[in-house]
Image (spheres, helix red, strand yellow):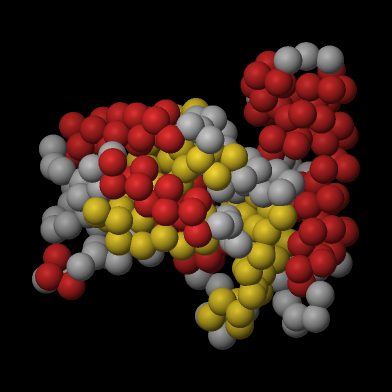
C-alpha cells in the first residue's frame, strides 16, 4: 500500500522546484548524509516544510564517513544555497545514523554538521526519523538506505527495539553492474531510471528478499501489525509486494521514500528553549 502524506508531498515539490515557502520564526534543518544522496530538509517550528535540496554524494558508507572533507564541503554548499533562497541563516540542524553504529562515527557526523556551520540539536537513528513522518503508534519502520537495512519497532508510540544490517542500495547497484557487465557508476544511473525497472527488478529481487529476511529476523518475538518502508532503495513498484510476501505482514510504502527520513530528521531537530519563544 502506498501512503500519501501531505507534508511529504509538499516537501517533495519544494525539493523538485527549488522554491521556498513563507515562514515565521526559527527554522529547523534535517541533514540526511546518505550513501548515494545528501538531502537537507527545512521546516518551521510547526514542522511545515519550508525548503529542501538534494545532491548526489558518495562520502558516507554504512553510516561511516569515508571522506570527511567532501562531506563538509557538500553540506556547506547545500546550506549556503538554501540560505540564499530563504534570505536567512540556517543555524539549527539534526542528523541521523543507521542503528547501532560506533560512537566514533556518530561524533564524525556531528562534526561534519558543525564544520558546515550548524549548531547540532539532535542525532537520531534513521528508522526513528522515518517513524516521525509516518506518525505510527504500533508497527515497524524499515529504512532501506544505500548501505544498510535499518529497523525500528514501535509500541504505543515508543521505540522498543532498533537494529540494522549492511544490505542496501549499493548492493543492488553491484548486482546490476555484475549482471549487465557495466561499471558501477553506470549501473547506479541505469538502476535509478524508472524506464529500466522491468529489466532491473528481476535482477535485484534477491537483494530485496535478503532485506526482507533481515527485517523478518529483527521482528522475531515482537507483535508487529504492519511494516512501513522508507529509503530510496525501496523506490520500486514491486518492492512492497515482494517484502510483504516474504515477511507475511502488510507493508506500507511512502510516495516519496527517499525524502521520508530527511523530513523526519527535521521534525526531530530540538530547538533550544530560548529559540522556541
Where is residue 136 shown, x and y percent of the image?
A: 56, 73
Quadrant of image for the C terminus: bottom left
| Residue depicted at x 80% and y 46% | 208
Q: Nearer the viewer, residue 234 or 89?
A: 89
The residue at the far front in this view is: 104
| Residue depicted at x 75% and y 82% | 223
Left or right side of 65 for 30: left
Q: Is residue 187 visible?
A: yes
Quadrant of image for the N terminus: bottom right
Q: Quadrant of residue 127?
A: bottom right
Residue 131 vertical position relative to residue 16 in the rendered view, above or below: below
Where is residue 222 shown, x and y percent of the image?
A: 75, 80
Residue 198 vertical position relative to residue 88 in the rendered view, above or below: above
Q: Nearer the viewer, residue 51 or 217?
A: 217
Q: Nearer the viewer, residue 129 or 73?
A: 73
Numbered marks: total? 0
| Residue depicted at x 28% and y 41% | 115
Residue 91 vertical position relative to residue 86 in the rendered view, above or below: below
Where is residue 70 shown, x and y percent of the image?
A: 42, 29
Amino acid at each position: 500500500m502506498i501512503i500519501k502524506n501531505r507534508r511529504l508531498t509538499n516537501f517533495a515539490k519544494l525539493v523538485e522546484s527549488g522554491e521556498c515557502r513563507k515562514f515565521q520564526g526559527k527554522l529547523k534543518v534535517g541533514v540526511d548524509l546518505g550513501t548515494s544522496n545528501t538531502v537537507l530538509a527545512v521546516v518551521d517550528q510547526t514542522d511545515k516544510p519550508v525548503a529542501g535540496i538534494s545532491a548526489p554524494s558518495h562520502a558516507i558508507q554504512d553510516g561511516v564517513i569515508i571522506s570527511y572533507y567532501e562531506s563538509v564541503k557538500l553540506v556547506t554548499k547545500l546550506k549556503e544555497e538554501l540560505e540564499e533562497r530563504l534570505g536567512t541563516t540556517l543555524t539549527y540542524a539534526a542528523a541521523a545514523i543507521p542503528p547501532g553504529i560506533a560512537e566514533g562515527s556518530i561524533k564524525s557526523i556531528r562534526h561534519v554538521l558543525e564544520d558546515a556551520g550548524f549548531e547540532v540539536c539532535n542525532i537520531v537513528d534513521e528508522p526513528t526519523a522515518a517513524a516521525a513522518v509516518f506518525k505510527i503508534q504500533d508497527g515497524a519502520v524499515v529504512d532501506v538506505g544505500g548501505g544498510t537495512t535499518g529497523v525500528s519497532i514501535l509500541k504505543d508510540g515508543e521505540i522498543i527495539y532498533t537494529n540494522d544490517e549492511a544490505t542496501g542500495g549499493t548492493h543492488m547497484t553491484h548486482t546490476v553492474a555484475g549482471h549487465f557487465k557495466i561499471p558501477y557508476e553506470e549501473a547506479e544511473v541505469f538502476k535509478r531510471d524508472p524506464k529500466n525497472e522491468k529489466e532491473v527488478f528481476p535482477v535485484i529481487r534477491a537483494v530485496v528478499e535478503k532485506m526482507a529476511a533481515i527485517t523478518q529476523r529483527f521482528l522475531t518475538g515482537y507483535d508487529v501489525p504492519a511494516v512501513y518502508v522508507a529509503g530510496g532503495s525501496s523506490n520500486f513498484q514491486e518492492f512492497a509486494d515482494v517484502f510483504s510476501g516474504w515477511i507475511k505482514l502488510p507493508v506500507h510504502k511512502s510516495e516519496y521514500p527517499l525524502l521520508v527520513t530527511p523530513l523526519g530528521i527535521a521534525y526531530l531537530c530540538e530547538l533550544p528553549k530560548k529559540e522556541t519563544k
